[in-house]
Amino acid sequence: MIVSPKAANEAGDKFGLKPVCAGPFKFVERVQQDRIVLEKFAGYWNASNVHVDRVVFRPITESTVRLANLKSGSLEMIERALATDLPEIRADAKLKLATVPELGYEGVTVNIGKSDAGKTAFGKDPRIIQAFSLSLDREAITRVAFNGEFLPGNQWISPKNPYFQSKFPVPKRDVAKAKELLRAAGVTGPLAIDLMVPNNPETRQVAEIIQAMAGEAGFDIKIRVTEFATSLKEAEEGRYQGYMLGWSGRVDPDGNAYMFHRTNAPLNYGGYSNPEVDKWLDEARTKGTLPERKAAYEKVAEKVLSEGPIVYLYHRLMIIAHTAKLDGYKPMPDGLIRLTGVKLKP
């Protein structure tokens, strides 16, 4: 993000309370848990294409309440509408949808070497992680939890991405194979796993589906619902075995892989370390063409997908719903709302 160095240095850790950045709008005020207010910045290079004078962001955690406010006219736009609400939104002539597949992914991060919690059977034996992965029906998860609107996946980028490694397709559920792997790993009874789950309705539902599916293969999933900020701290300190965690994604595949799989990288919550993977991730950064970089990432995928620091599950649909009075809005796969070019009819 582009920020003012002078303002950032002067404000220090208080910069977020009154940010000075670059864009079509400037900061006016933030009232905690109530609103963030922006107004049009006359000095923006493309100000003539900014047709909205004032923007108010309001945090409304319950998706049903967000949608009700949109339908009543109290809001002009909502982000992250539920996939299960799509039929209702599509049926309302006063509303419009703007959707695009995300750049990121949703999955289960496995504590492999972050702490003593990673020294359990689940974190130590790749066969057990593979069994867990095979116990899950990714297509069924998206059907049940998201009306089939989300895209099943097994890599850090989606199957529609040019960097997707088709050599490693999204696996089908195979409970028999999962049980076989567990037996080979010496698991004789239900294997208990602490699964940390951020506290939001969609993630909790997915965790419950995983709990039921994995249970049929021989896993005893203990769901531990945790506030999101707390869960990140728990992950950083290694106090978990499995962690339901997504990533917003980056345009370049490096932004979805390097920080998560390189030894001691900042978002490597699982404590994964493989010198060969480190070398290939570095190599991908030095190549200039897609085929060369994809070849390096193929080697990364072969190791990472077999050793299991992250069990990738699906890729979300970024869902923005807005009033039909709003024209010109284009969704972006990073999920950020951009209002340049947008007009609101009276």
Image (cartoon, helix red, strand yellow):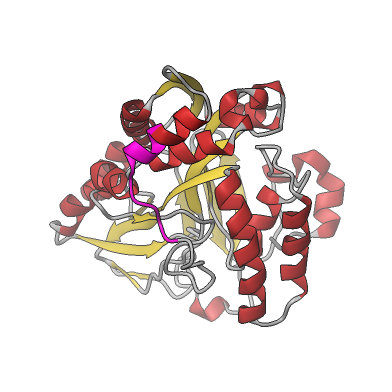
Image quarter of residue 249: bottom right
**x 54%, y 30%: residue:** 242
Frontmost residue, 126 versus 54? 126
Give the mark count: 0
Where 172 sits versus 53, above or below? Answer: above
Q: Residue 47: give x, y in percent of width and height.
A: 56, 76
Image quarter of residue 144: top left
Frontmost residue, 243 versus 292? 292
Would residue 253 be seen by someone viewing this image from the given angle?
no
Q: Residue 40: give x, y in percent of width and height.
A: 55, 65
The quadrant of the rendering that contains the C terminus is: bottom left
Where 85 sits versus 346, above or below? Answer: above
160 left or right of 42 in image: left
235 left or right of 218 in image: right
**x 69%, y 46%: residue:** 18
Where 77 sits versus 197, above or below? Answer: below
Look at the image and give the residue range highlighted in magenta: 169-179
Q: Is residue 91 magenta?
A: no
**x 56%, y 34%: residue:** 32
Task: Tell which residue pokes out farthest to the front in this image.
Answer: 184
Q: Residue 343: give x, y in percent of width and height.
A: 37, 71
Image quarter of residue 301: bottom right
Q: Residue 166: give x, y in percent of width and height.
A: 46, 68
Q: Is residue 175 magenta?
A: yes
The quadrant of the rendering that contains the N terminus is: bottom right
57 left or right of 320 in image: right
Frontmost residue, 43 versus 9? 9
Frontmost residue, 32 versus 164? 164
Where 204 sits versus 150, above or below? Answer: above
Would residue 155 be seen by someone viewing this image from the given angle?
yes
